Each structure stands twice: as C-alpha cells, then as structure tokens.
Image (cartoon, rainbow, N blue to C red):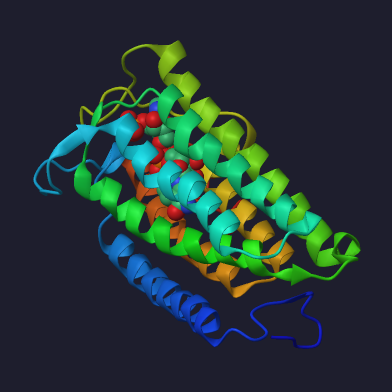
Amino acid sequence: MTFQGIPWTLYEDENTRFWVHYGTVILGFVLAIITAVAQWKNPAPYGKHENKDVNWGPMIPQRLGHILSDATPGVLLFLLVFFLYGESRHYTNYVFLSLFLCHYLQRGIIHPLIMNYRNSKVPIGITLGGFVPNCIYHFINADFVGSAVFNNNYFYDPRFIIGILLFISGFIINRWSDWKLKSLRSTKGEDQNLKYGCTGYYIPYGGLFELVSCPNYFGELVEWLGWTIATWSLAGLVWGLFSAATFVPRSQHNHKWYKQQFELYPRNRKALIPYIF
Ligand SMILES: NC(=O)c1ccc[n+]([C@@H]2O[C@H](COP(=O)([O-])OP(=O)(O)OC[C@H]3O[C@@H](n4cnc5c(N)ncnc54)[C@H](OP(=O)(O)O)[C@@H]3O)[C@@H](O)[C@H]2O)c1
C-alpha cells in the first residue's frame, strides 16, 4: 500500500495479511471507545480504587499479574510476531523493536518486581483486562514494525525525529514519576492525613507532580504519541487511543480521590495534562 507522504509500504501483494492487520486495527479502535466509556463510569478496581464488593475472580499475586498482563504480550508476543511473522529487516524496524522492548521490559518485568504494592494480590479479572487488549494492540504494532518497509532516508524525516524525541521524553517522565511514587512508601513509613482510612498513600511533590496528579500516565501518553508519529501508522494510533481511553478517565478518578482524601491537596493541580486537564 503506498500513498503520497507515507514513508513506508506494507503488504503490497498479500490480501490476507492486509485484512488481518487492518481488521484488527478496526477492532482496536472499537475497543478503545468501549474502554473509555466503561472506565469513565467505574475505574478498574485495583490500587486506589480497589473495591472488595465487586468480584473480579480469584486473587493472584499482584507482581505475577502484571508480569502476565504486560510482559507476555509486550515482550514475548511482540518478539515472536516481529521475528516469525514480520518480514522487513531494515535498521528502522530494529529501532522500533528496541523502543517497544525498552518500555515493556521495564513495565512488564522491572516495574512489577520493584514496586511496593499496598495489596500483594490482585483479582485475575484485572490481569485479564490488561492481557487481552495488550495482545490485540501489541500484535498489530509488532506486525507493523516487523513488516513495514521504510524509506531509506526515514531517519532524517521530521516525523521520525520528533516522534523519537517525544517517546524518549515520555519514557523519562513516566519512569521518574513511578520511581517517585515508589519512594514515597519506602521513605515515609505508615500513614498520612487520609480522611477515609486508606493507609499507605501520600501527597506526591516535585517535578510534574506540581502540575498534575498523574504524571506517570502523562509520560506514557507522550511516549505513545511519539510512537504514533514516528511509526506514522494506524497500529500506533489505535494503541495511543486505547492508552488515552485508560489514562484520561483513570487520572480523573485519581485526581478526585486525592482531593477527597487529603485536605491539603494542592488545588492548582490538574489531573493529567499540565494547565489543561
Ligand atoms: N498503557 C496502558 O494502557 C496502561 C494502563 C495502566 C497503567 N499503565 C502504566 O503502568 C504503570 C503503573 O500504573 P498504575 O495504574 O498502577 O499507577 P498508580 O496507580 O499511579 O500506582 C503506581 C504505584 O505507585 C503506588 N502509589 C500510587 N499513588 C501513591 C501515593 N499517593 N502514595 C504512595 N504510593 C502510591 C501504587 O500503589 P498501590 O498499587 O498500592 O495503589 C503503585 O505501586 C504506570 O507507568 C502506567 O503508565 C499503562
């Protein structure tokens, strides 16, 4: 497929692969809309929004849950699809593979192993709620970056340069913010002035926490925006939309939660996007 201005070609003569790819892209788009509506009504019941009245299935260790939901699709499935199903082997394909793996080795393995979760267990429904969409979106992204034939001079294309810079900036913001959240619990001990007895949470300060309640989500959103621009693909776009469908409502729920729990919560903070939302 080639249109003017698109820096790659994909499935020039393979009808089946074309329809598998773009059919899954459409599914991903629909799933993003359903997720936004569902999450807006009720936040997924883990962490601050854990809800013992709702049954999401048997409990499993939280660290294992996150490894299953994130590392299996983000590392294992991605590698399998890239190497066994993908067909294009230009440097650009490997740059995209490395960026994705960087994020998911961190998110799917290091992050669950080092975080201090308040509850060591999570319902299996939460794990599956991450695992299933991740498989769908990571399949199309691995298929895209493993199969697209990029123009030879794509490294100099503004889309590539701007996208990579956004991805790296978002990654740094996301990592720093998650590290800051982790350090709150290790340095402050047991409790702070929470109204509703939800112990172990603190008001985070510093960096982008001065502007928004959820800079970790903001950072990740910037990463996927960068990914979408750099890959210039519908696969990247629907994954970015799905991430936004999770982060926009959840950051709003988190922001409300902070304001309810902490009397001294800074009033000037926004939920997700500095000065805007
Ligand atoms: N791409 C996607 O669709 C997607 C979806 C969800 C998450 N993620 C990513 O996954 C990572 C974790 O997400 P999350 O939803 O678990 O983030 P989170 O609710 O901000 O929690 C992150 C960690 O910090 C702890 N924590 C949060 N607020 C705290 C506070 N005020 N005081 C002390 N500790 C606090 C949490 O403990 P508790 O667990 O005990 O609350 C948890 O261990 C983020 O990097 C996020 O970007 C990606």
Residue 194, by quadrant, is top left
Q: In what quadrant of the picture does the N terminus appear?
A: bottom right
Query: Relative to 116, does residue 273 appear above or below in the rendering?
Result: below
Is residue 211 visible in this depiction of the protein? no
Q: Identify which residue is drawn at 34% across, 30% down.
A: 63
Question: In the figure, is residue 184 to the left or right of 212?
Answer: left
Please say whether residue 164 is visible from this viewpoint. yes
Q: Nearer the viewer, residue 1 or 269?
A: 1
Residue 66: % across, % down:
36, 39
Number of marks drawn: 0
Residue 175 placement, left or right of 37: right
**Relative to 184, residue 123 above or below:** below
184 and 125: which is toward the camera? 125
Q: Residue at x 69, y 54 (%)?
A: 96
- Front-lying residue, 38 or 214: 38
Q: Which residue is found at the position 81% from the left and 87% from the top? A: 4
Residue at 38% x, 53% y is: 250
Foreground pick, 261 / 273: 273
Judge left or right: residue 113 versus residue 117. Answer: right
Q: Where residue 181 sits in the image (x, y, percent)?
A: 48, 28
* Quadrant position of ligand 1: top left
Instruction: Give the percent coordinates (x, y) of residue 98.
Output: 67, 46
- 218 in relation to 159, above or below: above
Residue 215 point in image, percent of width and height:
55, 42
Looking at the picture, does residue 50 appear above or below residue 251?
above
